[in-house]
Image (cartoon, grey):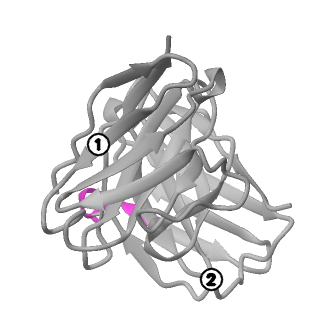
Amino acid sequence: QLQLQESGPGLVKPSETLSLTCTVSGGSISSSSHYWAWIRQPPGKGLEWIGSIYYSGNTYYNSPFKSRVTISVDTSKNQFSVKVSSVTAADTAVYYCTRTGSYLVIDSWGQGTLVIVSS
Amino acid sequence: QSALTQPPSASGSPGQSVTISCTGSSSDVGGYNHVSWYQQHPGKAPKLMIYEVSQRPSGVPDRFSGSKSGNTASLTVSGLQAEDEAEYYCISYAGGNNYVFGTGTRVTVL
């Protein structure tokens, strides 16, 4: 059974870079049928797509994040990662790593990790 | 893009039906049959309930159904059960690798 697990610091200072990694187990990140995406959810608010990556390295970003987000993949480790630069309190959220099919049909989710931006 | 509009809340008694709407525009919901629905219980990750407007993944009860008319997609939960009480979100493709999320609807089982 596919499992996704987020890892990374739970506390980041304003203006610094938030970095998270998702480790995929029970399946290959090199699947030709899937994409790998980051979704976030600020406390008490709705879901927000950050961006997606294909195993080949092709990336797709949500417009509001394009200037400060980088998503990368490491097929040798079966991992993908996200970096969000110049964070502010507005970036405080639960960050989920996910597997998607076409058109952002999200069929698997990590448990989510809360990242708080605070000095 | 603007978020898709969902009612903040909906409710029904056990055994009844509840329908949640997800209203967008001709650039998203109305323009594509790529609408999916997710159920989220408090403190948990969301779960896929419907994709491609009306397709149900394996393991999702047939009490959940989806439809679309014009710029509005809908999720209907028939035969409400206590475990259906959750937040529900819609997502629609909006062209050019863009996606729009719904505002979320809290379903309460009375």
Q: Is residue B99 visible?
A: yes
Q: Amino acid at mark 2?
A: Tyr
- Numbered disc 2: what chain? A
Q: Which residues are magenta?
A: A63-70
Which residue is tagged 2?
A55
Image coordinates of residue B16 in percent, x first then y, are 49, 25
Image position of B9 with respect to B23: above or below: above
Question: Could you say which is closer to the camera, residue A92 or residue A11?
Answer: A92
Q: Which mark is residue B21?
A: 1
Image coordinates of residue B80 in percent, x first then y, are 56, 28
- In the visual, does A113 lie left or right of B9? right
Identify the residue at horizontal 58%, vertical 44% (top origin): B63
Q: Residue furthest left?
A: B26
Image coordinates of residue B92 in percent, x first then y, are 33, 61
Q: Which mark is residue A29?
A: none
Q: Residue furthest top?
A: B110
